[in-house]
Image: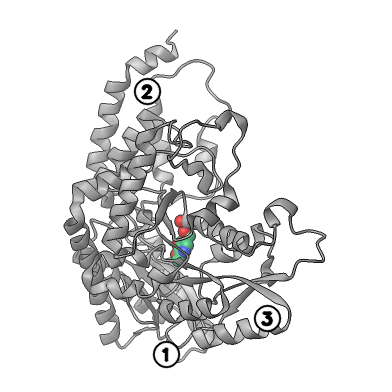
Amino acid sequence: MRTPKDVEREFAIAAGTVVDWVSRYFQEADRYPVLAQVHPGSLRSALPPTPPEEPEPFEAVWQDFQDRVLPAVTHWNHPAFFAYFAITGSAPGVLGELLSAALNVNGMLWRTCPAATELEQVVLDWLRQMLGLPEQFGVIMDTASVATLCAVAAAREALGLEVRTRGMAGRPDLPRLRLYTSEQAHSSVEKAAVVLGLGQEGVRKIPTDGDYRMRPDALEQAVVEDLRAGWRPVCVVATVGTTSTTSVDPVDEIASVCERYGIWLHVDAAYGGAAAILPEMRWVLRGCERADSFLVNPHKWLFTPIDCTAFYTRRPEVLRAAFSLVPEYLQTPVADAVNFMDYGIQLGRRFRALKLWMVIRMFGVRGLQEALRGHLQLARQFAEWVDASQEFERVAPVPFSTVCFRHRAPGRDLEEANRFNERLLEAVNATGRAYLSHTVLRGRYVLRLSVGNLRTELQHVRRCWNLLQEHARALCTDPT
Ligand code: PLP
């Protein structure tokens, strides 16, 4: 019988097969349907419900990956993946992941892998410079959701209410705490309030202007009202590149409100922040240098495989005060070294810096800039087609590479027009030749096309546009 040691010895052969496949896959991802054409439960029913007792050869596992797992994959690497925020797992990123998995270090303390800590410091400082942000502390977290949670926890810690030690329940001395964010902010902001005991009622959603940007006047009014009513403001979360329309909140003006009332400002630039590596797009981060904390997701629009969120703060001592809790077995005699486990929720930490380091080095800042410029250009082109069309209309500005649009569905009331657009989206996605997602803006069902894949070319965007037009025409003549 083969032992785990035998299996380990066969690594090179198995790895050769996998790596060959990956390099072909990157070139030919468009051979697959973008959206998995399977029903719920199809993969589960195709696999044995119990684990194998004896070792299985790699070939058998590989065959099942090809025949059973792959058909149930939605291909985010497909150049016609236009849903949510489109992303790419790039070659340098995959190499970084491979090395990180091979080394399998746990970078909780500096001494448990000095390279993991110091490469993280170096690469986050590079990224900070690329974005034009001032010098500050950076740490890699898994996702934007977790980074925002940490930011709000730090903001709560900064109030000096002793929540860390005494908790929040059963304390008549505590004011009710309020978090402010725009009605267009990502759900992760509200989730942070849920987890941290502020509750959904502790989140005040600030109205947006005609272009879906937070209104600083409405923010200030809300803060003043709340202070009068006995609430304690904890944090304002502004967004650069909101999830639905990619609107950019006026961070500079929001920062002024925060400074006037002493409120922590956190900026969620998960998607849009990456654009600031382009000199002509620097404006999107205007005012972010005044934020207490800031995040951007290299796993969204900087070709770094999921997951990798870059989190920055000008007040690391507060973040540390919120999270550092060192059991005896992790006490370390090394002074002057950063132990990243002190700056967030997780103890164990993957060597995520490797993949970001490899992406930045192997693409270079210029290569990354070119890729992003290409995406901006493709989105602009699509927006032009929509604008020139009689059947479709654009429903929001396009500051980045995401276009919000809808079919006009003439002669139908709002509800019917919404249903029409929903059916149009389902029809296009069912072809497996493109994948788009949707949102609802002021009661209107809206389609979104987001360009973020390294291999997306004009031909893919044009094909998607043709598909939309064809299916819209078919639906117009369909009486059902
Ligand atoms: N913030 C914004 C603006 C987003 O669009 C998203 C996801 O799309 C998130 C946060 C959550 O990102 P993550 O999956 O990294 O938690």
Q: Which residue lies under the disc numbered 3?
A: 227
Instruction: Answer yes or no: is residue 371 visible.
Output: yes
Q: Earlier in the sequence, mark 2 or mark 3?
A: 2
Residues 410 and 229: in front is: 229
Query: Residue lying farthest top?
Result: 1
Callout in the foreground (1, 2):
2
Q: Answer left or right for 83 relative to 92.
A: right
Q: Is residue 467 above or below residue 118?
A: below
Judge the density around disc 1: few (<14), some (14-19), many (≥20) Cα neighbours within 10 Å.
Answer: few
Q: Is residue 43 above or below residue 314?
A: above
Spatial CA distance of label 3 from label 1 is 48 Å
Callout in the foreground (3, 1):
3
Q: Earlier in the sequence, mark 1 or mark 2?
A: 2
Q: Which residue lies under the disc numbered 1?
A: 410
Residues 104 and 98: in front is: 104
Q: Residue shown at 39%/66% (left/top)?
A: 436
Q: Position of residue 448 (x, y in %)?
A: 39, 71
Hey, what amino acid is under mark 3? Answer: Leu
Q: Which residue lies under the disc numbered 2?
A: 58
Q: Position of residue 60 (x, y in %)?
A: 39, 24
